[in-house]
Image (spheres, rainbow, N blue to C red):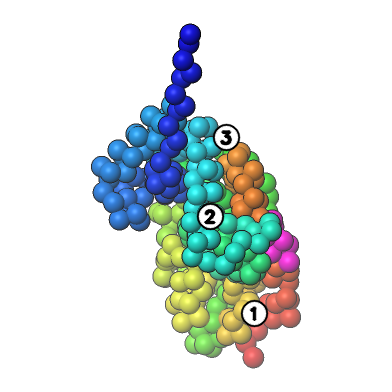
C-alpha cells in the first residue's frame, strides 16, 4: 500500500510580501530599508520562499533584480495578500475595486501635468489603489526591474517589452518679459544666438531627441543648466537667459514670451513602455488607460496651441 505524499507546505505570506517589495524596488537593500529589515533577512526569506515554491523567483540583471515567470505568479499572489491586509484597516472592498501598488517613471513635466491628475482622478474611484511616480528623464530601460510603466521621450529600442506612442508635445524658445526689456527681443536666429541658453546639462542628457538646441543653435552659450525641467522654467522666469521649454509648461506663465515660433517648434513624442505581463494586472491596466485618456484630453496644451495668441515675441 502506497501512502499519499504529504502536501507541499504553503508559502509564508510574510515572505510573499518581502518578495513584492524586492520586485517593486529591484534591490534587496532598498526593500530591506522600506520593510525595516536588514539585507541578510530579506535574502534569507527570499531563499525560503524559493524553496517552498520550488524554483527561482528572481534573476539578476544590470538594473537590479527582476521577477522570473514563477516570481511573477508569486508577486501576484503577494498583491492579493497585501490587498487583504489593507482591507482590515480600511473601508470594505467594493465590487471591481482596484487595489495594490503601481510604479511608473516619467519625465518631470509629464509626471506633474499629466500623470498626477490622471492618477488622482483614478484614485477617487479606487481609493485602495496606490501609485508611485519616479521622475526621471532618460532612455527606456532594457531591464525595468521594479517598474510597471515607463514614459519616455522618443521611440524606445527595447526587448521583452511592449511600447506604443502616447502622444506628442512641443518645445519652444521662451524669455521673460523683464529679460527682454533689459536685453532686447531677438527677431532672428542670429540675434537669438547672442543670448545665453537655459536647458539641460549637456553632458548628462541621455535622450537624443532632446538635443535640439545643440543642433539648431550650437553657438548659444549655457547659462543655467539643470536635469530638472521645472528649474529650466523658473530660471527663465528669473531672467537667467532664453529657455528651451515645453510649451505646456511655459504657456502657463504670462510673464514668459515665446520667441521665433516658426524657427523653433520641436515636436517630440511621448512613448509608453510596459513589461509584457503588466497589462494582465487590472491596476496597471487601469493606470495605463487613465494616462492615455489624460494625454489625449491635454493634447492642445501639450502642443502649445492655446498660446497661439502670444507667441510673436512682442513685449506688451
Asked if the residues shown at circle 1 and circle 3 are in contact, with their CB atoms under 8 angstroms apart, the answer is no
Q: On the rendered structure, is 166 left or right of 30?
A: right
The residue to which callout 1 is attached is: 313
Query: Visible in this render: residue 254?
Result: yes
Given residues 134 and 20, the one toward you in this image is: 20
Given residues 132 and 127, the one toward you in this image is: 127
Asked if the residues shown at circle 1 and circle 2 are in contact, with their CB atoms under 8 angstroms apart, the answer is no
Element under disc 1: loop
Q: Residue furthest toward the top?
A: 1
Q: Residue furthest toward the bottom?
A: 316
Q: Is residue 67 above or below residue 100?
A: above
Element under disc 3: loop
- Residue 10 lies in magenta, yes or no? no
Q: Residue furthest toward the front?
A: 1
The Cα atoms of the two marked residues, 2 and 3, are separated by: 28 Å
Q: Residues within 10 Å of mark 2 (few under 14, many from 20)?
A: some
Name the spot of residue 147 as percent of width and height, x first: 50, 48
The residue to which callout 3 is attached is: 160
- Residue 289 lies in magenta, yes or no? yes
Label 1 or label 3, whichever lies nearer to me, is 3
Extent of the magenta region: 287-297
**Mark carried by residue 83:** 2
Name the spot of residue 246 as percent of width and height, x first: 59, 67
Amino acid at each position: 500500500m502506497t501512502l499519499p505524499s504529504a502536501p507541499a507546505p504553503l508559502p509564508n505570506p510574510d515572505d510573499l510580501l518581502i518578495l513584492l517589495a524586492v520586485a517593486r524596488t529591484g534591490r534587496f537593500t532598498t526593500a530591506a530599508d522600506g520593510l525595516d529589515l536588514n539585507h541578510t533577512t530579506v535574502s534569507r526569506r527570499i531563499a525560503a520562499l524559493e524553496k517552498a515554491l520550488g524554483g527561482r523567483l528572481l534573476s539578476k540583471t544590470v538594473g537590479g533584480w527582476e521577477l522570473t515567470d514563477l516570481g511573477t505568479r508569486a508577486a501576484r499572489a503577494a498583491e492579493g495578500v497585501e490587498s487583504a491586509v489593507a482591507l482590515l484597516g480600511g473601508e470594505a472592498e467594493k465590487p471591481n475595486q482596484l487595489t495594490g501598488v503601481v510604479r511608473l517613471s516619467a519625465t518631470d513635466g509629464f509626471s506633474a501635468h499629466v500623470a498626477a491628475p490622471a492618477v488622482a482622478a483614478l484614485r477617487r474611484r479606487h481609493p485602495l489603489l496606490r501609485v508611485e511616480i519616479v521622475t526621471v528623464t532618460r532612455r527606456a530601460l532594457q531591464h525595468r526591474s521594479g517598474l510597471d510603466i515607463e514614459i519616455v521621450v522618443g521611440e524606445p529600442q527595447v526587448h521583452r517589452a511592449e511600447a506604443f506612442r502616447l502622444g506628442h508635445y512641443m518645445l519652444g524658445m521662451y524669455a521673460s518679459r523683464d529679460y527682454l526689456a533689459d536685453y532686447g527681443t531677438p527677431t532672428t536666429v542670429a540675434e537669438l544666438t547672442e543670448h545665453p541658453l537655459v536647458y539641460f546639462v549637456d553632458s548628462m542628457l541621455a535622450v537624443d531627441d532632446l538635443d535640439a538646441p545643440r543642433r539648431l543653435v550650437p553657438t548659444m552659450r549655457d547659462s543655467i543648466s539643470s536635469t530638472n525641467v521645472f528649474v529650466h522654467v523658473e530660471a527663465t522666469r528669473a531672467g537667467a537667459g532664453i529657455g528651451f521649454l515645453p510649451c505646456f509648461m511655459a504657456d502657463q506663465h504670462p510673464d514668459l514670451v515665446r520667441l521665433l515660433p516658426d524657427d523653433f517648434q520641436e515636436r517630440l513624442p511621448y512613448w509608453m513602455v510596459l513589461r509584457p505581463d503588466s497589462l494582465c494586472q487590472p491596476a496597471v491596466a487601469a493606470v495605463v488607460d487613465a494616462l492615455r485618456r489624460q494625454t489625449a484630453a491635454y493634447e492642445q496644451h501639450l502642443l502649445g496651441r492655446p498660446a497661439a495668441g502670444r507667441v510673436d515675441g512682442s513685449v506688451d
